[in-house]
Image (cartoon, rainbow, N blue to C red):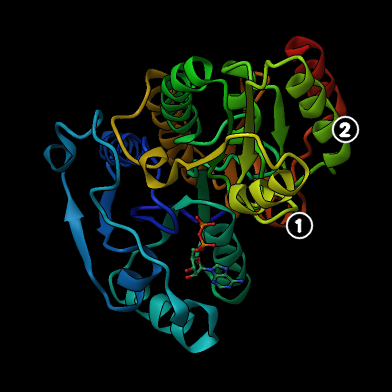
């Protein structure tokens, strides 16, 4: 068992994700329920270094569960990569007698938390908040479901035009170097092809199938591409196809930042509430330097080290399903 936690800090770091507010709310209200003092840290690790920290009350998090983004704001913080920056952050926490830190963010933020907790005596606990779902050891990350639903809604609309005009559409979705948004939104919209960074795509096969469609005068094809796929995104894929199918109308649409914003889905609000609650409980039970994940609908506490060392996998089975269902 670890030391007794009495005063905790909470921050959001890295890319924002819908549902982060719901997680902050859960942390604040669970902490207060247990008699802890809860302090909000603005702009992630940047605010920690600059001592931009304030005491939060239950009403500080009223009316935020339905809002996208993060009320604590977020940032990418260069100084935190260096020991001196992390030392400043630690000194600020120490001076304020904060003895537990909850980090809501993606794998980069967890990497920062690993460095920080290895160097300083500060119990840290992570909450997986990223639209990319690229954190090893959890079935869900906060924001993924909302992002996928946004992508699906947009792709459905594009499909109407694609079908009306007989066009090839290449749609690029977010995910950094992970293909989950592409995989899920592609399957849900009936995409003929999905290109993800985790698996090598056979472009020659796709070209042959498109040439065959062209011969049959039925050149309608939806291709969903993850931004981090091996070709360098939708524009690069378009160049490859243009060479092989010079007469075809091939359009590109990059969905971009609309996938990050918006009101969180019900699922994201639920998992954020659950993870926020369990993060506080876990700190109080003396279990830390882990992140809160959900596996097979059960809470799991995965060492932060494991999360940053391992990568999730997209199985070949998924791609087989894509192929069979699109044929
Ligand atoms: P995300 O958490 O969404 O993956 P980033 O990769 O941008 O976003 O990471 C967020 C922040 O976490 C960075 O701006 C930096 O402050 C901190 N961070 C990331 N990696 C490290 C690292 N190896 N050492 C220290 N801090 C890190």
Asked whether residue 197 appears in the rendered view, the answer is yes
Relative to 284, residue 112 above or below: below
Instruction: Estimate the x, y position of residue 172 in percent, counting from the top left.
Output: 55, 42
Q: Which mark is residue 203?
A: none
Characterize the local packing of mark 2: few (<14), some (14-19) or many (20 or more) Cα atoms within 10 angstroms: few
Residue under the point 63% across and 44% down? 134
Quote the CA–CA distance across marks 2 and 1: 34 Å
Instruction: Estimate the x, y position of residue 78 in percent, counting from the top left.
Output: 46, 79
Secondary element at image label 1:
helix
Near-viewer residue (19 or 292): 19
- In terms of image quadrants, where is residue 327? top right
Relative to 133, residue 190 above or below: above
Q: Residue furthest left?
A: 59
Label 2 sits on residue:
205
- In terms of image quadrants, where is residue 107? bottom right
**Disc 2 beta carbon < 8 A from ligand 1?**
no
Label 1 sits on residue:
309
Residue under the point 62% across and 33% down? 224
């Amino acid at each position: 068992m670890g030391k007794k936690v009495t005063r905790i800090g909470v921050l959001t770091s890295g890319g924002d994700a819908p549902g982060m507010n719901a997680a902050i709310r859960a942390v604040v209200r669970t902490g207060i329920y247990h008699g802890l003092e809860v302090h909000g840290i603005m702009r992630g690790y940047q605010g920690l270094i600059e001592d931009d920290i304030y005491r939060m009350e239950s009403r500080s998090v009223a009316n935020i569960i339905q809002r996208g983004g993060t009320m604590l704001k977020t940032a990418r913080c260069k100084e935190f990569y260096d020991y001196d920056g992390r030392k400043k952050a630690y000194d600020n926490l120490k001076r304020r007698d904060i003895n537990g830190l909850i980090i809501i963010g993606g794998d980069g933020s967890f990497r920062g938390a690993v460095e920080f907790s290895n160097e300083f005596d500060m119990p840290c606990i992570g909450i997986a908040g990223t639209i990319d779902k690229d954190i090893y050891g959890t079935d869900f990350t906060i924001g993924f479901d909302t992002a996928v639903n946004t992508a699906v809604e947009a792709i459905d609309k594009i499909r109407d035009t694609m079908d009306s005009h007989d066009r090839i559409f290449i749609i690029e979705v977010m995910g950094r170097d992970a293909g989950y948004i592409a995989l899920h939104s592609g399957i849900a919209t009936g995409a003929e092809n999905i290109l993800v960074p985790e698996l090598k795509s056979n472009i020659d096969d796709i070209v042959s199938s498109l040439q065959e469609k062209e011969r049959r005068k039925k050149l309608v094809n939806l291709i969903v591409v993850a931004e981090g796929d091996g070709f360098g995104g939708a524009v690069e894929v378009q160049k490859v196809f243009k060479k092989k199918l010079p007469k075809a109308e091939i359009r590109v649409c990059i969905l971009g930042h609309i996938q990050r914003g918006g009101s969180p889905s019900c699922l994201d609000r639920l998992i954020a509430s659950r993870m926020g609650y369990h993060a506080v409980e876990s700190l109080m039970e003396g279990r830390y330097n882990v992140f809160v994940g959900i596996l097979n609908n059960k809470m799991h506490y995965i060492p932060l080290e494991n999360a940053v060392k391992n990568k999730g996998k997209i199985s070949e089975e998924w791609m087989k399903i894509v192929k069979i269902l699109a044929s």
